[in-house]
Image (cartoon, helix red, strand yellow):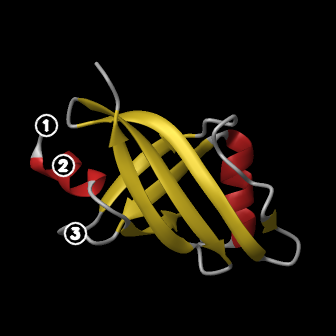
Amino acid sequence: MNALVQKLSEGQHPVEVSLRPARTVKALQESLERGYVLVKFTGTRGGTELGVPLDRERSDLSGADFEQERGRVRIVGDLTLDYVKVRCIADIELPSLQGNGKLEPLPE
């Protein structure tokens, strides 16, 4: 396993949601509806931005009140980082759009 995957698999790390053109709760809601979210691990050199396809069964959006812009969401999705299959798990607070996350290596 490479060093980046190893690092992000150990413990929790600061993350934020990358949204374009603006970082808003509404933009996050739209991204979740499309089923694809950009999650950035901010504690790596330059940050590591991952495109996470939303696993609707494992993710939890029930704690979010998008109208009042409060609560939290859990974003879960499987992807490949540097040729390693991983599961990204990120807990994001509204309205800061920041939180904690980690990677879990998946069996080959």
Q: Amino acid at mark 1?
A: Met
Residue 63 image offset from top left, x and y in percent: 78, 63
Near mark 1 (Cα within 10 A), the count class, few <14, some 14-19 or many ≥20, is few
Near mark 3 (Cα within 10 A), the count class, few <14, some 14-19 or many ≥20, is few
Are the residues at dot 2 and dot 3 in contact (C-beta closer than 8 Å)?
A: no
Q: Quadrant of residue 66?
A: bottom right
Near mark 2 (Cα within 10 A), the count class, few <14, some 14-19 or many ≥20, is few
Q: Residue 65 vs residue 21: left or right? A: right
Q: Residue furthest top?
A: 108
Q: Residue 52 vs residue 70: left or right? A: left
Are the residues at dot 2 and dot 1 in contact (C-beta closer than 8 Å)?
A: yes
Image quarter where the N terminus lies is top left
- Residue bearing the label numbered 1: 1
The mark nearer the N terminus, 2 or 1, is 1
Secondary structure at badge 3 equals loop
Residue drawn where x is 26% and y is 57% of the image:
10
Q: Residue 18 vs residue 9: left or right? A: right
Is 59 in front, or is 28? 59
Q: Nearer the viewer, mark 3 or mark 1?
A: 1
Residue drawn where x is 74% and y is 45% of the image:
33
In the rendered structure, find residue 6 and report the number of the disc placed on it: 2
Is 86 in front, or is 44? 86
Q: Is residue 66 above or below residue 56?
A: below
